[in-house]
Image: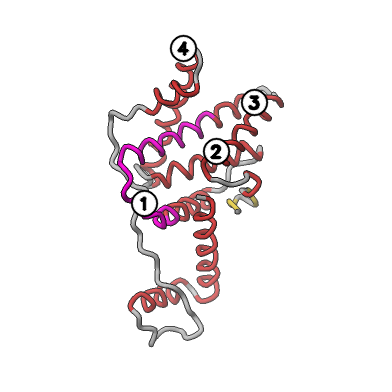
Amino acid sequence: MYDAVKSQNRRTAERNALIQKWGVSAVEKAERDAASGSAGSSNPKLVVPPRRVVRNYGVFRPDPTVDTGKALADALGDTPEEKALIKQIYSSTKAAYEKEAAVRGWKNNIAAGLTFFTVAAMTVYHNADMPSEEAVNTYYKVVNAALDEMPELAAAAEKDKQGLNNTLVGFGGLLITGYADGKQNNDAATLEAYKTLAGMLIKMVLKTDPENLQIENGLIVM
């Protein structure tokens, strides 16, 4: 996943550099020409690949029978109290997440869950401020494009996509909740414990060293 996102991040940066140099209209025209196989009217100095086809492989149809809160509680909790707390954290996090996803136009898309998880895990791991809204929106687009490079995802079951997305949201919620508690109580041990957990989850989900993900000047940098 990290390699796919990194590749898309590079393409986005290259396209943004071309836009900065030639302007968005010129770049979009060159992309249309490239897609049609005709570059006769394009700027000969402006060579671009065709604009990518948006497939939205990460989009899924939600199934109300999927109970990720219970699944997380059973997997992570040892006592009834722990299970109840995990379910409560998941439920409140999921409600806030769904509200924000609806506003952003990100509903029912694994790209949104991955974005939420990545931002939460990076923030906790680095004990840093949240990246800017622009950075988060850009990262979502990059992740969505990266998922479209995985044709096997198109054949994945709807419940599997939903379960993965919900689990990512749950992981993010648990990290943020523990991190916020450590910050509020100025508890260095708690902050260190959640940094370790964030690092483990980054390695598990994104398959990369957490040090490879940075927040610089409000931007997500790989």
Q: Nearer the viewer, residue 156 or 220?
A: 156
Q: What is the distance, in whole Å, between disc 4 and disc 1 at their CAs?
A: 38 Å
* Magenta residues, dominant SS class: helix
* Occupied quadrant, residue 33: bottom left
Q: Nearer the viewer, residue 210 or 152?
A: 152
Earlier in the chain: of badge 3 and badge 1, it is 1
Q: What is the distance, in whole Å, between disc 2 and disc 3 at their CAs?
A: 15 Å
Give the class, few, some or many, for how many residues have Cα within 10 Å of label 3's Cα (few <14, many ≥20). some
Residue shown at 36%/55% (left/top)?
Answer: 151
Q: Is the C-beta separation of discs 2 and 3 under 8 Å? A: no
Question: Which residue in the structure is indicated by mark 4?
Answer: 80
Find residue 52 and report its horizontal and vertical position in percent.
39, 65
Assign a secondary structure to mark 2.
Answer: helix
Magenta span: 145-174
Residue shown at 62%/45% (left/top)?
Answer: 209
Question: Which residue in the structure is indicated by mark 3?
Answer: 182
Classify residue 60 as left or right of residue 84. Answer: left
Image position of 66 with respect to 164: above or below = above
Image position of 215 with respect to 189: above or below = below
Question: Which residue in the structure is indicated by mark 2?
Answer: 120
Question: Which residue in the structure is indicated by mark 1?
Answer: 152
Amino acid marked by disc 1: Glu
Q: What is the distance, in whole Å, between disc 3 and disc 1 at their CAs?
A: 40 Å
Find residue 203 and report its horizontal and vertical position in percent.
57, 41
* Occupied quadrant, residue 177: top right
Q: Nearer the viewer, mark 3 or mark 1?
A: 1
Q: What is the distance, in whole Å, between disc 1 and disc 2 at their CAs?
A: 27 Å
Give the class, few, some or many, for how many residues have Cα within 10 Å of label 2's Cα (few <14, many ≥20). many
Earlier in the chain: of badge 2 and badge 3, it is 2
